[in-house]
Image: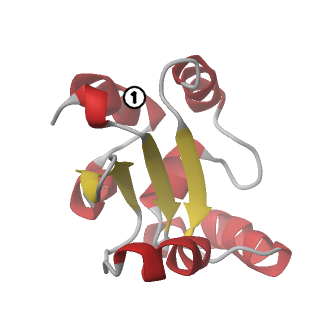
Amino acid sequence: MKKDTLQKLIFIYNIDSGLRNLLLDGAHKILSPSTYVCNLCDITFGAFTENTVWKKFRLQLADTVQMEFLHKDEFTKAYRSKFGYKFTFPIVLMETTTDLEIFVQTQELSQLEDATALIVLLKARL
């Protein structure tokens, strides 16, 4: 993968947008963490606030790499007609000048234990 074709990284959470979903999501993390379906959410956010290690990295990376953060319903609405792809979520995609490519697969995200592991993985691929 060539860095010069990278337009942006798109982080897609395995939850839908909206206040109701945000509240249910936070409660799910607290009450039943073993059945929680979005490891990307879990390692980048606590129940209701962004992980400080992740936030610091995200802000530093923003100077060099454009990033977009979407819930799965937002991604489907914004990209379905443009690309027509079907992905499993959560996922990190790389938008190039011509296509969307998988940057970090769902299975890889599900195996990460914390924000630091995600940061190490992203740095290695960038």
Residue 19 sits above or below residue 110 on the image = below
Residue 98 sits above or below residue 67 on the image = below
Q: Residue furthest right?
A: 19
Percent x, y for residue 50? 69, 41
Asked if residue 104 shows in the view, the reply is no
Percent x, y for residue 110? 31, 58
Quadrant, the N terminus: top left
Q: 89 or 70: which is nearer to us?
A: 70
Quarter of the view holding residue 25 = bottom right
Percent x, y for residue 36? 50, 71
Residue 27 sits above or below residue 109 on the image = below
Residue 63 sits above or below residue 73 on the image = above
What residue do we see at 58% from left, 25% from top? 62
Horizontal side of 24 relative to 20 (left or right) equals left
The disc labelled 1 sits on which kind of residue?
Answer: Ile
Task: Determine which residue is flagged by label 1.
Answer: 119
What residue do we see at 65% from left, 71% from top? 31
What residue do we see at 57% from left, 72% from top? 78
Horizontal side of 122 relative to 41 (left or right) equals left
What residue do we see at 45% from left, 41% from top? 8
Quarter of the view holding residue 49 = top right
Q: Residue furthest left?
A: 1
Quadrant, the C terminus: top left
Percent x, y for residue 20? 82, 80
